[in-house]
Every structure is written in structure tokens, then in C-alpha cells.
Image (cartoon, rainbow, N blue to C red):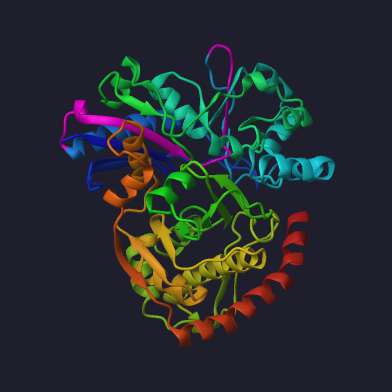
Amino acid sequence: MRYLLGIDLGAGSLKAMVINTTGHLTGEASCPVTTHIPQPGFAEQDPAQWRGALGIAVKQALANAEIPATEIAGVSVSAGAHIPVLMDAAGEVIRPAIMWSDQRSLLEAQALHAQAGDMITKTSLNRVNPTWTLAMLAWLQKHEPANITRTAKLFLAKDYLRYCLTGTWETDYSDAIGTLMADDAAKNWSPEICALIGWNRQTLPPIKPATEIVGGVTAQAAALTGLAPGTPVICGSNDTSVEFFGVGGITPGMGAVKLATAGVLFLATQGKSVHPPVSCYPHVIEGLYYTATGTNSCASAHRWLRDTMFATGGFAEMDDLAATIAPGSGGLIFHPYLQGERAPYWDPHLRADFIGLTISHSRAHFARALYEGIAFSIRDVLQAAQALGLHYGAIRLMGGGAKSPSWRQIIADVTGLEVEVMENTDASFGAALLAGVGVGIFATPEAAVAQCVRRVAGCTPDAATHALYTQQFALYKDAQAALAPISHRLGSI
């Protein structure tokens, strides 16, 4: 039997997954990576650590799968969008990679929007904000000009990891759009947008189809990972594209929610659907696009509460205790703005908070309030998207948070939407499926989904609980509006 390897770089770890040609898991492994916060609003990672994690996770996944490396038919890599890696002419990485959660380029984003916001949105489908690569590069031009002068090649995160495997330099179109520097009409880099920040287009990678084989595993990469030299590697795509594909998000009108470091709401559309500030990306299936809009803190808030209050019992204890508390958490409300907020506020200065705290509240209340607060933030984003004309039916969950039965039901009850849970929701799974399309194991992306993507559970919203949450959501919104000025004042002290 032949096997497929998917690799995904998340904000907290790099994961490698081996599946067979029916989509069943045969082996997986992960290796942690570290985000450095040199000052509030900044978030960076070291690409050298990514490379080390790549070797550790892939070797262990192959060992866990108990198959020879020669049985791997194809490899695909994914990672978060927007994350630039700058390389000099000698092949050395110049500086740490700025993460998508970094908010340092707010002023640059505002200036670009004032200067050419309409042109940027018309050309590259999206509105300027600090999450996108364009504003990050403008910040680097201003604050680190020597590093920009040294730059010979720009990689996106998944492209750098693939470079570690193949030594090749390219990106896919979805990741290119994620830089905010591509022209959707031309399906290439935009000279006009690059000129806004004085960026040398020669440093931008060639754009290839996500399923195209772009190289084979080099001898050096084989020694690092345990893969067989020459194993085909496809171009791949960013994490959200392959995750949405991996849960079967291939039909216009299908929605999904990602419960990972960020909480992201997706919708597949026939053709581009440009509704700033909702993001629009090309789908891995030609002709389809998908919208994505999300929050800055989801699983990151989950981890924070675990580390703060549940260091011994971990996520399992959190989930068990949350299930013992009635909906509404006894009036305890959580705003999950631990790193500012993206949609629908786009405000890096917002602060997280628990409000309504009384002496009767316990750790269990905090656990449930966290789940509910993140679900409220998803509803906040959902309502903003619906107001722009986007319509959602059932939503499929993906990301690590989808494994929590309590959280799944809370999301159904808060949003009022049917929630579907798929057998495998990891980006590494979607990446592996995409590799199968690229190497010809599956004739089409649709064939890959039909053969490998399976629904295993669902949650129907409870009408009474949804009504209760609707009342509490109104308080959540009122409190957010009232506390936003306090957040801004705290940030100025």
C-alpha cells in the first residue's frame, strides 16, 4: 500500500501525519515550537526551530506508522498564512519570522489604507491590516532597512519548510493572496502594490498550483527527516486552505469553524466574494474561493487558562469541569482579547477580561466561561459576516478544539447552527490529501474528499439554551463596547 505525508506548522507545534489512500491515520507526531513576544503586540518565531521540528516530527511519524519511507508516495506542507521569512543571497535567514498574530504594523496598515486602500482591495481582494504581510514588510522597511537591503528571497512559512525538503523556491496562489501583494485578475504579483512600499518584485517567489509537484526530497533533507531521497513534494497551500479542504469544504455555501490558535469562520463561494474586512482567498479547487474571518485568540486562550488554572489536570479536566456548569456560567463572561482582536473590531489594543465575577465562582465556571466567551466571539464574527450578505448553513468544526464535546455543543447553542464533526480535522490531514491529488493517487480534489472525508458526530442547537445565550451575547456586546476605551487607556499608561 502507498501512503501520504502531510506536514503542518501551527503556532504552537509542527505536526506530521501519515495516512493511507482511504484517508485513515497510520502514524503521526508533533514537535513544539516557541513564539517569542519581545514586547506587547509583537510575535515572532525562529525558522531554524521549524527546521529542527520538521526533522523530529517526520522521523517520529514514520516510526509510528511502521512503514518504510519508500512507501510515502507524496508529501505536502502547510503553515499559517502571511508569515514572511527573509533570506539573503547566501541562503541565510535574516531575522525571525513575524507571525500573523503580530500587531506591530498597525500604523503602516492605516497609512497604506489611507493611501491606496480601494486599489489594494480591488487588486488583492482584501483590506490592509497588521495581520497581512504587506503591512509587516512596510514596518520592516521603516524600522529595519538594512535587513530589507539584504533580502534576496521572500518565503512564506510553508514555503520555507518545503525549501528545507526540496531546496526549491515557489508559493501557491492562496498564500500569494495572503501577502496582499498579488493581483487576482492577473494571478501574479502586483507591480502597483509592490511599488507602494518600494518592494523588489524579484524577491517574490514564482506562483505555482497548490497540487503541482515542485521537487523531490534532497539527500540532506532525507538525512534530516528519514524520508527517501527523491520523494515527490507538491507546492501545497496555507493551513486554512488545506484544513477547509480536509473537512470537505468544497461546495459553495458550506461553512466551517476552526478552533485553533485563532478562531476562524469559513464559507466556500463560487467565484470571489469580496466583503472587507472579511478575508477572501482562492480555494485549492480552481474557480472556488472561500471567505475567512476570525479572532486572534482561540486555542491560545484555551492554553492560557490551562496553564494558569489547570496545570495538573490539563485540557481533560477543563472539559470535564466545564460540563458540570449550567449554560451562562453563573453570569461570568469572558472576552478573549489576549492579543488584541481581529474581526470584527480590528483593534490590537483591546484587552481580555472576565466580568461578573463573584465569590461563588469556581475553576469550573472559568472553564465554561472561556468556552462560552470564545463561542460568543465566533458569533460576533458570524453576525458581522451575515450582515455583509454571507449565508451559512451547517458548519463543520476543525482544529484541536473540535475534540472537546462540551465546546462543540456550546458553539452549536451559541450560534444556533448545526455543528458537524469530521473524523479528521487537522491541517496535516488536508495537506496529505492534497499531496494525494498532486501525485495522482486521487484523480481530483473532489475524489479525494469522497474517498477520505467522513462525518463522525454532530451537535444540534438546543432552542432554550440558544435563547439564553442570545440574552447573554447582548451583554457580551454591551460590555465590549463599554470596556474598549478602558483597554485603550490601559495601553497608553
Residue 13 is situated, as x and y percent measured from the top left of the image, at 41, 43
Residue 408 seen in this snapshot: yes
Q: Residue furthest right?
A: 115
- Left or right of residue 345, residue 472 in this image: left
Q: In which image quadrant can residue 459 be found?
A: bottom left
As drawn, the residue found furthest toward the top would be 90
Q: Tell whether position 67 is magenta.
A: yes
Depth check, front residue: 103 or 275: 275
Q: Which residues are magenta?
A: 66-90
Residue 78, x across and y down, in percent: 44, 38
The residue shown at (50%, 60%) is 253
Indicate yes or no whether the magenta region holds residue 380: no
If the image is split into quadrants, where does the N terminus sit? top left
Q: In this image, 412 relative to 475: left or right?
A: left
Q: Which residue lies at the image location 76% right of the left edge and 60% below the top edge?
A: 488
Residue 196 in the image: above or below residue 420: above
> Is residue 313 something one can see in this rendering?
no
Q: Quadrant of residue 323?
A: bottom left
Between 225 and 192, which is closer to the camera in this rendering? 192
